[in-house]
Image (cartoon, helix red, strand yellow):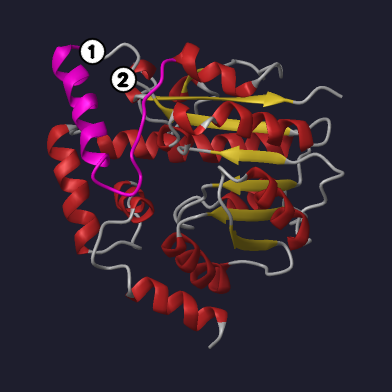
Amino acid sequence: MTDHDEALRAIGSSLDRPSAARIYDYFIGGTTNYAIDREFAEKVRRRLPLMGDYCMTSRQFLGRAVRRCAELGIRQFVDIGSGLPTTGNVHEVADEARPEEDTHVLYIDNEPIALAHSQVLLADTADPDRHHAIAADFLQPEDLWERVRESEIINLREPVALVINAVMHFIKDSEDPDAVLAYYRQRLAPGSLLVLSQMTNENPVNDDERQALLDLLEYYETTTNPGVLRTMTEFSRFFGDWPLLPPGLVYAPAWHPDSATLFTRSPSESRVIGGIAQKPA
């Protein structure tokens, strides 16, 4: 059986439960989702009507961040927890920002279904010499980094943009994300960039929203992706001592907004924070 056949088999066997990657895909207007995913997403939307906009805010931040990395000369991207290739893929944004099409992108996810979808979709939309998807777990950094090395898509002696977008709210402090991120920061070449974002529970607009965010965490406790929300202060430590690029760690809509950016008039209502830090030379 080929890898493509295995991917299709994995997708077919996953349809009895919601997939976090496909739920996110549904919220941002993608088409790689099924009835079970949409049912869960609509349950969440009934409690948090703007959940789709929060997810789109994360995706928009990803696009602007990748574009900025490419403009700064970064030609290599490692996207951990990449989920499903969908609207605004990292490799598409990077190639658009660098018409030379000299960028290399490695997508990484530990969810078999997300990986299966990635392999199927990349087969149709990507350059196999420059774009690839592999299975690895953010929380197993030594194994993940070895797989990055073995992929031969990324030259780890050169600067890399390490992208961990809309992932950290699925990583609880009990799983020691500080040590994991320290491992990645240590191994990245000087000049590399670290792109991080996650949902926040800072400054809810009222008591109802505060409770709705707690309810959101309760919903996700019933999935394979239980979550945690963090304040800016709690989240900022993940950049280590690397200096942040302007404008720093901010609500995502305040990070170099463009004409399509949601929540530009009230960034704090987006529920998403993010930033980019650079490893000193």
- Secondary element under disc 1, as helix, strand or loop, is loop
Q: Which mark is residue 34?
A: none
The foreground one among 201 and 218 is: 218
Where residue 205 is drawn, which disc sits there? 1
Residue type at tag 2: Glu
Relative image position of residue 142 (x, y in whole percent): 69, 46
Residue 261 in percent (x, y) is at 42, 31
Q: Residue at x 36, y 39 (%)?
A: 55
The reply, left or right, for residue 48 in relation to residue 193 is left
Q: Which is more toward the observer, 262 or 230? A: 230
- Could you say where residue 259 lies in the image, as x and y percent from the top left? 45, 31
Q: Is residue 104 magenta?
A: no
Q: Is residue 235 visible?
A: yes
Three-letter code for the amino acid on which mark 1 is drawn: Val
Q: Give the total of numbered labels.
A: 2
Give the residue displayed 53% in from the left and 88% down from the top: 1
Q: For mark 2, give the secondary structure.
A: helix
Q: CA distance from mark 1 to mark 2?
A: 7 Å
Q: Is there CB contact under 8 Å for labels 1 and 2?
A: yes
Disc with the residue nearer the chain's start (1 vs 2): 1
Query: Residue at horizontal 18%, vertical 11%?
Result: 206
215 in the magenta segment: yes
The answer to whether any part of residue 265 appears in the image is no
Q: Which span of residues is magenta-colored?
A: 205-231
Which residue, given by chain and number where applicable, does mark 2 sit on? 269
* Dot 1 alpha-carbon crowd within 10 angstroms: few under 14, some 14 to 19, many 20 or more: few
Q: Nearer the viewer, residue 202 or 88?
A: 202
- Please tell me whether residue 224 is drawn above or below residue 46 in the rendered image: below
Relative to 7, is 275 on the left or the right? right
> Which of the 4 quarters of the picture holds residue 127?
bottom right
